[in-house]
Image (cartoon, grey):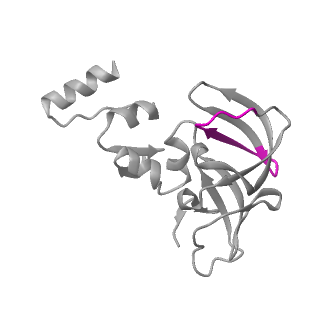
Amino acid sequence: MRTEIKELHQRLKTTTVYVTHDQIEAMTMADKIVVMNGGRVEQIGAPLELYDRPNNIFVAGFIGSPSMNFLKGAIRTSGFEGPGGARLPLVAAPSGSDGQPAVYGVRPEHFTIADDGAEATVHVVEPTGSETQIVAHIGGTEVVAAFRERHAFKPGDKIRLKPDPRLAHLFDASSGQRLTA
């Protein structure tokens, strides 16, 4: 059905307003998305713009499936100090932000297995054929990681997960707004 609606929209070349609560439907069908929360517009943009550069935690958690992981902690000059003292990489910290409480956001597919990653304990392994998804805990915080390559993880395994710092997001712990360096 989505395909037929999208084909019709493209063929007619008309402006169409399509209202849905299904973010996958919105991502696949829209040229532009308006994300609303409690009657308030949170962000307007192209699907991948919202996915790659969410303005705030609400948009970051709403767009994408599985949704973005959020780890609470503090910004340090050397990176981000997450739950349980986990060190997570940053490309650059916002100036004057050392010690500032923040939330580190990372999408499941932006994790790699690396010796210098944060220690994580695997709880659930979900092989789908095209990828392997895991549910793990970093310092007591649940995260979902997705890998294109196959891994033979088992529940209880200790692994090291490293987010790609170029694709990580920082949000203000109080306002939920995205922070920029």
Q: What residue lies at 54% left-to-right and 36% top-to-bottom?
A: 65
Q: Is residue 126 above or below residue 77?
A: above
Magenta stretch: includes residue 140: yes
Residue 171: x and y, percent? 58, 61
Q: What residue lies at 19% left-to-right and 31% top-to-bottom?
A: 10
Q: Quarter-wise, where is residue 73 in the image?
A: bottom right
Q: Nearer the viewer, residue 145 or 98?
A: 145
Residue 156: x and y, percent? 86, 36
Q: Quarter-wise, where is residue 99 in the image?
A: bottom right
Left-right relation of 65 to 154: left
Residue farthest to the top, as pictured: 1
Left-right relation of 67 to 21: right
Q: Nearer the viewer, residue 5 or 117?
A: 117
Residue 45: x and y, percent? 35, 50
Considering the image in quadrants, where does the N terminus appear?
top left
Q: Quarter-wise, where is residue 137 in the image?
A: top right
Q: What residue lies at 83% left-to-right and 57% top-to-bottom?
A: 84
Q: What residue lies at 46% left-to-right and 52% top-to-bottom?
A: 52
Please provide the residue range marked out in magenta.
137-152
Residue 147: x and y, percent? 62, 39
Q: Is residue 106 above or below residue 95?
A: above
Q: Tag count in the figure?
A: 0
Is residue 21 among what the camera can see?
no
